[in-house]
Amino acid sequence: MDLMSKLEGEYRKKDIPKFSPGDTVKVHVRIKEGDRERIQVFQGTVIKKRGSGLGASFTVRKVSSGVAVERIFPVHSPNITEIERLRMGKVRRSKLYYLRNLSGKQSRIVEKKEDKKVNNKKAKAK
Amino acid sequence: MKAIFGKKIGMSRIFTEEGESLPVTVIQAGPCQVLQVKTADKDGYSALKVGYEELEESHVNKPMGGVFEKAGVKAHRYLREIRLDSDSEDINVGDYINVDIFKPGEKVHVSGISKGLGFQGGVRRHGFGGGPKTHGQSDRLRAPGSIGQSSYPSRVLKGTRMAGRMGNEKVTTTNLTVAKVDPENNLLCIMGSVPGKRNSFVKITGAK
């Protein structure tokens, strides 16, 4: 009887899409202003995913009008209504801190056309 | 005075509807069965004797088995008393105390046995500053400093703070807020940290 997972299951989101560092994502965040509620979209590159369970979070970085902005989102927060994966990125490490020191052309990430893990599984099934 | 006994499960976080994240300690509290009702007339003070965590009959020795049999309740691992301000009238032997005596938002105190940290020096145990790092110092970084004067008193005063065993003692954390009550699984989520390691026995008391 794992009481902890019983409790956490109540708060855990079940429909989180797959995404990994290097991907470009759109994060829909619910924002409360007084008694008005609206959805704000933050689009950028995932540079970090950390933690497990309810404590998991990810960091999205974007450069808007020359100023870099990084936001950390708790994966299971009810304020995050949707995470959309727009583009997969081909990267070789799990924490993309090196992007902070790069700008312009150098900070681009090559697009990954296919998910190798999925393809490998398919190949094995054959 | 409201109180219940339980077991620390661990720490986690829960989210409010507004999306706020609360750091919580999860405690599996109760149900505690009443073994005896102590009254001012008979025992000199008012209290409830309760048991927590049911056991197999075969895990209890004969003298303790007799105690449970006499009260007509199931065997329990822990037996403790809950002091009351005045004699209770509506609680009888065999009744259960459940987590629903607490409501979210209420303030509670939590007592338990703190984690045993073993032999620790003055810096960790009492928050001493240690010695200077530089200016020609050697072997003074975490030294306790002077422990007394020479000619008078010419001895070390009793109770002088020094290195020694730390932890493994009763600690009470006061005025914590109850974040969530789950009567179905007998779980209590309390904001902040609570003494003891996982699976350690704790007492939760209502704060006045």
Image (spheres, rainbow, N blue to C red):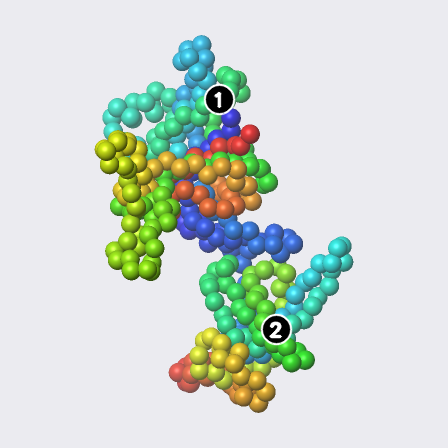
Q: Nearer the viewer, residue B174 or B72?
A: B174
The chain holding disc 2 is A
Q: Residue at x 44, y 21 (%)?
A: B47
**Relative to A89, does residue B176 appear above or below in the rendering?**
above
Labels 2, 1: one chain = no
Q: Residue at x 52, y 75 (%)?
A: A47
Which residue matches tag 1? B84
Q: Residue at x 51, y 53 (%)?
A: B13
- Give residue A71's quadrant in the image: bottom right
Residue A84: x percent and y percent?
61, 74
Give the amino acid type for the residue marked by disc 1 in the picture: Leu
Which residue matches tag 2? A69
**Separation of residues labelled 2 and 1 (CA atoms):** 57 Å
Residue B151: x percent and y percent?
23, 33
Residue, far bottom: A105
Q: Mark 1: few, some, or many residues within 10 Å (few <14, many ≥20)?
A: some
